[in-house]
Image (spheres, rainbow, N blue to C red):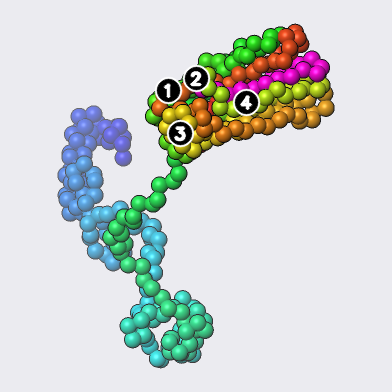
Amino acid sequence: MTKQKIIDLFGYKAGRKLYNLLYSSCANFCCIVKDCLGISFLGSPTLYLNQQGDWVAASGPQGPQGPQGPQGLSGFEWDPTRIGTNQYLIGDIVNYLGNYYICIANNDALIPPSTLGVYWNTYSFVGPQGPQGIQGIQGVPGPVGMPGLFAQTGNSTIISGTTVESSLINGGVGTLSVPANGFQVGDSFRAVFGGVMNAANNQTIRIRVKTNGTILLDSGVQALTNSIINDIWSLNIDFTIRQIGGATVASIVSLGSFHYIKTSNASTQGFAFNVVNNTTFNTTINNTLDVTVQWGSNNAGNNIYSDIFILNKTY
């Protein structure tokens, strides 16, 4: 019944007094019920009635069941009663007389050692990692790489229309010199040249390898029977020190090969030459390498230059 209906039925003053009395009595009754039921004044329950009719402490609903944990290994001891429906199955592990075996074929308690490889295989559990082993001995060092001595970094001066002997070498990085007493027996070197050349018909060319004006290698006059037009040429020179000392004691052997590829038909032409100098070569003084070219005539169609030159020590 609402407050207004009580006032309408008993009048304004009497109705209000009756309503207030009923409200106060009801509130006190609710507090008593809450206290009996274990419900706090604010209305939060501390107890609830379970299905057995007992008042128990409140708790949240049961959560979902967690996933099953990993299955442990079955007992390992050998069991001779494992036959029939309880026979050993593939993957079972047993301990027989201190050794472990894994079943590889279903069987009725067959003894592992006697059926090894057919029904059982040996099995090892992985133990903890052992300590690190001692470091092995150092390996034998590899051979020393071929050291570079000099690399030309620009084209040489074009030797053109002249019979004057001129150098094929221009500036670069490194050195072309070996100081006095700097050679040892067996020292070996390789020089690699390349460039472009032109020549009129029936011309000659001569190549010399020198140190301090002393000729180590001389090709002599070589004939170029056909005209040459922008042909690519290459010159390889190898040296080996045979003996060290002054002139007539020191000895050096040198070998050169000069080739050019004809642009007209891609054929390769050239010549090779070698010399042993054991008379004027001297290792007790500073030696500086030079390679020269000399044309047989001053024909304006004759010209040659190098655009690559590398000197390496090979031994």
- The residue shown at (73%, 12%) is 297
Decide which of tag 4 and tag 1 comes sooner along the chain: 4
Q: What is the CA distance from the residue labelled 1 to the residue labelled 2?
A: 8 Å
Which of pointers 3 and 2 indicates the residue nearer the eye? 3
The residue identified by callout 1 is 286
Q: Amino acid at mark 2?
A: Asn
**Residue 271 sits in which quadrant?**
top right
Please, what is the three-letter code of the amino acid marked with disc 4?
Answer: Asp
Which is nearer the N-term, disc 3 or disc 2? 2
Q: CA distance from mark 4 to mark 1?
A: 21 Å
Residue 183 location, quadrant: top left
Q: Residues within 10 Å of mark 2 (few under 14, many from 20)?
A: some
Instruction: Look at mark 3 in the image and give the residue it sits on.
Output: 249
Mark 1 vs 2, N-terminal side: 2
Would you name the residue on which mark 4 appears?
218
Q: Which residue range is magenta in the image? A: 196-211
Which residue appears at 78% of the width and 25% of the height? Answer: 262
Tell me if 153 is positioned left or right of 299 in this view.
left
- In the image, residue 264 lies at what x, y percent? 82, 23
Identify the secondary structure beneath mark 4. strand
Image position, residue 112 (x, y; %): 43, 86
Secondary structure, mark 1, is loop
Measure the alpha-carbon separation of dots 3 and 2: 17 Å
Q: Can residue 76 be seen here?
A: yes
Picture coordinates of residue 109 (x, y %)? 44, 89
Q: Nearer the viewer, mark 4 or mark 3?
A: 3
Mark 4 / mark 3, whichever is N-terminal: 4
Between 183 and 52, the one lying in front of the other is 183
Mark 4 nearby-residue class (10 Å; few <14, some 14–19, many ≥20)? some
The percent position of residue 86, horizontal first and vertical second, equals 45, 86
Q: Which numbered disc flags the more N-terminal residue, 2 or 4?
A: 2
